[in-house]
Image: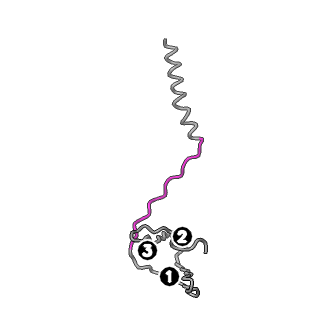
């Protein structure tokens, strides 16, 4: 009886420890990034350049280039507006903000 109890315990240990060792060999997910801080309305200390090419107004095409100078090594988070034209709620999609790859 004692031998069967020891064998049962040994088998139980193998069953419990087996999957743990197998999971350690599998790829593990990366940790989630830290949450983005809430947006703040503070003046930008630098000069943002904005170049608008409105030479194709007959087709309502405007090309816009914006340069935001930052110091190297800084962490910067750029947020896009969710209130896009013709939306009646903050549900704008970033792919509707500009043309794809143009």
- 14, above or below 89, in the image: above
Residue at the image point whose x is 49% and y is 13% from the top: 2
Q: Which residues are magenta?
A: 25-40
Query: Earlier along the polypeptide chain: callout 2 or callout 3?
Result: 2
The residue where tag 1 is placed is 48
Q: Residues within 10 Å of mark 1 (few under 14, many from 20)?
A: few
Residue 57 lies, with reference to residue 36, above or below; the image says below
In front of the other: label 1 or label 3? 3
Q: Which mark is residue 86?
A: 3
Vertical arrangement, residue 62 with respect to residue 95, above or below: below
Q: Earlier in the sequence, mark 1 or mark 2?
A: 1
Quick one: quadrant of the C terminus?
bottom right
Q: Main secondary structure of the magenta part?
A: loop
Mark 1 element type: loop
Q: Residues within 10 Å of mark 2 (few under 14, many from 20)?
A: few
In the rendered image, residue 34 lying in the magenta stretch gets the answer yes
Instruction: Please report the residue visible at 50 percent of the width from the left and 69 percent of the height from the top.
Output: 94
Picture coordinates of residue 86, whole percent (x, y) = 43, 74
Q: CA distance from mark 1 to mark 3?
A: 27 Å
| Gap between marks 1 and 2 measured at Cα | 19 Å
| Mark carried by residue 73 | 2
């Amino acid at each position: 009886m004692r031998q069967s109890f020891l064998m049962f315990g040994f088998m139980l240990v193998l069953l419990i420890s087996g999957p743990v060792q197998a999971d350690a060999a599998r790829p593990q997910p990366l940790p989630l990034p830290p949450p983005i801080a809430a947006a703040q309305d503070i003046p930008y200390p630098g000069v943002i350049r904005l170049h608008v090419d409105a030479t194709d107004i007959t087709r309502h095409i405007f090309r816009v280039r914006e340069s935001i100078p930052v110091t190297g090594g800084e962490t910067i988070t750029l947020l896009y507006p969710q209130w896009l034209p013709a939306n009646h709620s903050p549900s704008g999609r970033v792919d509707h903000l500009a043309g794809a790859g143009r």
